[in-house]
Amino acid sequence: MPVRAEHDRAVLAGLLGRDPVLHAYELGDLDDFFWPYTSWYRRGDAVVLLYHGAQPPTLLALAGPAGVGELAALLGEVAAVLPARLEAHLSPGLEAALAGSFRVTSCGLHHKMALTDPQRLAAVPPAGVTLGRADLPRLDELYAAAYPGNWFDARMVDTGRYVGIRDGDALVAVAGVHVFSRAYRVAALGNVTTHPAWRGRGLAAAAVARLCGLLRADTDQVTLNVKADNVAAVRLYERLGFTRVADYSEFTLTAR
């Protein structure tokens, strides 16, 4: 079956919606907010997303065990049209499909987690205020001190789904989203951090609890990605009612 670019959002939503937790990022990127920054490829039921709203672009290719074979074939076919350098989020083993065209450098194993027991949120007092464009300078200062090298798109504060905890004029903790879509009713938490001087006080948990309260009013699936070796973060999210639902690995790809 030949590979082809797919431009029909309804078709993509139908395919990705079969597993909305695994594909929360892709479903969110169907939203008008993200759609202009996406390219989609399809082979049968397999779908690959190239998100070029960040530099370098990011390739998402995720599947359950039954779909890995078809997705590997799709990756082999699209390799020739991919950028010369990009990041990739791949289900286990799929990197082999790109190894002939790219130098593949592992950036580590990650867990996908989903909010499956929201009642646990009640045990954490929520805190924080919704942030906007006026808060971007303070956000940049916080990320520089607490989370350098993070993936943060300033447009995301326009979703109204960034929550910050302040000390005077300074931001000392934040919880935000990488993806948020009312239309597709999915969200993915991201860019959660606390200033080093304020850690150990439960501020990140309080901000996440506040954010999840906002998200649950508009979405059916609240998800996140977390590095497998970030034990403290994994435990935090488990305490808040998140469950590990899948694994994937991140890679840097450079054309041979």
Image: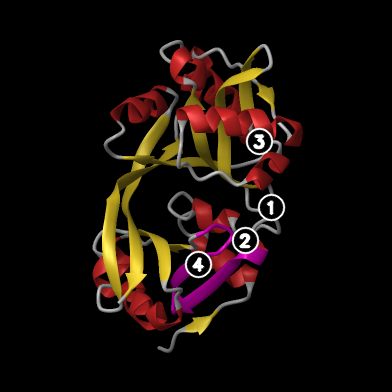
Which numbered disc flags the more N-terminal residue, 3 or 4? Answer: 4
Dot 2 crowding, Cα within 10 Å, few <14, some 14–19, many 20+: many
Helix or strand or loop: what does disc 2 sit on?
loop
The disc at residue 161 is: 3
Helix or strand or loop: what does disc 4 sit on?
strand
**Circle 3: residue type:** Arg
Dot 4 crowding, Cα within 10 Å, few <14, some 14–19, many 20+: many
Please report the residue visible at 55 percent of the width from the left and 57 percent of the height from the top: 54
**Circle 1: residue type:** Ala
Cα–Cα gap, marks 3 and 4? 24 Å
Instruction: Tell us which disc is closer to us: 2 or 4.
Output: 4
Residue topped by disc 4: 50
142 up-or-down from 109: above or below: above
Which numbered disc flags the more N-terminal residue, 2 or 3? Answer: 2
Dot 1 crowding, Cα within 10 Å, few <14, some 14–19, many 20+: few
**Circle 4: residue type:** Leu
Tell me, yes or no, if residue 123 can be seen here.
yes
2 displayed left or right of 127: left
Cα–Cα gap, marks 1 and 4? 21 Å
Tell me, yes or no, if residue 69 can be seen here.
no
Q: Position of residue 74 (x, y in %)?
A: 38, 78
Q: Are marks 2 and 1 in contact (CB under 8 Å)?
A: yes
Residue topped by disc 2: 30
**Circle 2: residue type:** Leu
What range is drawn magenta here? 36-55
Residue topped by disc 1: 183
Depth check: give the residue in front, 67 or 211. 211
Cα–Cα gap, marks 2 and 1? 9 Å
